[in-house]
Amino acid sequence: MEDIELRGCSLDELIEICQGIGLKRYRATQLFQWVQQKAVRSWNDMRNLGEADLRTLSSHFQFYPLELVREQRSKDGTRKYLFRLHDGETIECVLMDYERTMTRDRHTICLSTQVGCAVGCAFCATGLEGFRRNLSVGEIVGQVLDITHSVRREDPDFQVTNIVFMGMGEPLLNYDQVLKAIQLLNHEQGQKIGMRRMTISTSGVVPRIIQLAKDNPQVGLAISLHAAQDNVRNQLVPMNRRYPLASLMEACEEYIRITRRRVTFEVALTSENARNEEAKAFVRLLKGHLGYVNLIPVNPVAGTGMERPTSEQIKRFAQVLENAGISVFSREERGTDIDAACGQLRRLWESEDNEPIGPI
Ligand code: SF4
């Protein structure tokens, strides 16, 4: 029983375990709130549990707060965190703050779901490193909890409002853990992040797209599309060799039919693909599908040979799509002065001889 990961437990699981070891049901609720809502990082901070019960609980659970090894802060306020897991592996996540005048401020976290990634997209620093392992539920949720804990020291009212599963790893290849993490992050007695404020970004794992629509139709779906022709996409996003564009678009249609929600199609623009004929290929592929196109100018990643397009190229590309009636938005650029592209900070840190900067 000692290897149960505290941060990965649902309230129902905690109730069952607590009752099984002779503790009252309300202890499970208190424990859940300390961990999932107040985001504490040690048993000693759980002040209302009583010494004897704390001793019993701590002998039945493993509690692994993430260890912060590096934090970078951009001029625009974007913060990128490199965390070390209990087995020494490292992962990245990013916090982006958006101040709004008409609505409440948004605090979005981009989460990792795997250590490394097996997909191997051509433009991605994580893909260059290969796959190491899946993250557990507690490690996925832990990124939100530990960032929340850290920011609340400066701003006690801080609350994450949005989640994008767009960090290291392919979320739909760690499906069960990601879905359970979403339930925990949404829980009324946890972080209470709305289901519709969470988005899974996938390279196109077709069977899981349809399963997601059925299992959790409220969560948003983004497709890392990046190319509109199979021969090009095969090179950029190798998942395409397994699930080519025709099957991917069919799965998106099924997702839209079941959920009645739009899909976001992400297109990373480089100086190479931001051309008129590429834009026309996207029009042919996407016309008639319910979705938006999100244009993302790439941050250059050493070793990929990709270059950022000019703003004139981006504008012309967007115009071709818009003229065909396709909704386009360019992602608000964040963290361009730090190593903001997925996997960059981890690669940099692992190539240096670094020491952790200490607990959060
Ligand atoms: S872009 Fe995403 S799916 Fe592709 S290699 Fe990087 S982490 Fe994996």
Image (spheres, rainbow, N blue to C red):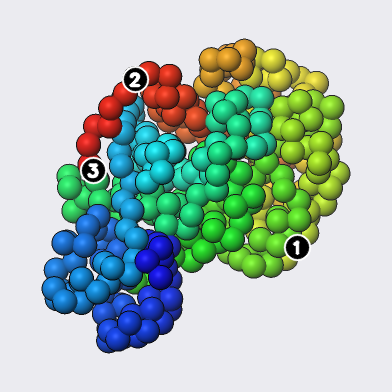
* Residue occupying the point 77% across, 30% down: 233
Q: Please name which of the two marks, 2 or 3, marks the residue nearer to the observer.
A: 2
Q: CA distance from mark 3 to mark 1?
A: 44 Å
* Residue occupying the point 71% across, 45% down: 204
In the image, is 169 to the left or to the right of 148? Answer: right
Badge number at residue 360:
3
Q: Quadrant of residue 284?
A: top right
The answer to which of 114 and 256 lies nearer the viewer is 114
Placement of the N terminus among the 4 image quadrants? bottom left
> In the rendering, at what x and y percent does residue 286 appear?
78, 41
Q: Secondary structure at mark 3?
A: loop
Task: Read off the residue under disc 1.
Answer: 257
Label 3 neighbourhood size at 10 Å, few (<14), some (14-19), many (20+)? some
Q: CA distance from mark 2 to mark 3?
A: 21 Å
Q: CA distance from mark 2 to mark 1?
A: 51 Å
Q: Callout 1, which amino acid? A: Arg
Q: Secondary structure at mark 1?
A: helix
* Residue occupying the point 43% across, 78% down: 12
- Mark 2, ligand 1, within 8 Å: the answer is no
Label 2 neighbourhood size at 10 Å, few (<14), some (14-19), many (20+)? few
Badge number at residue 353:
2
The answer to which of 58 and 238 lies nearer the viewer is 58
With respect to residue 358, does 320 lie above or below?
A: above
Label 1 neighbourhood size at 10 Å, few (<14), some (14-19), many (20+)? few
Q: Earlier in the sequence, mark 2 or mark 1?
A: 1
Res 150 seen here? yes
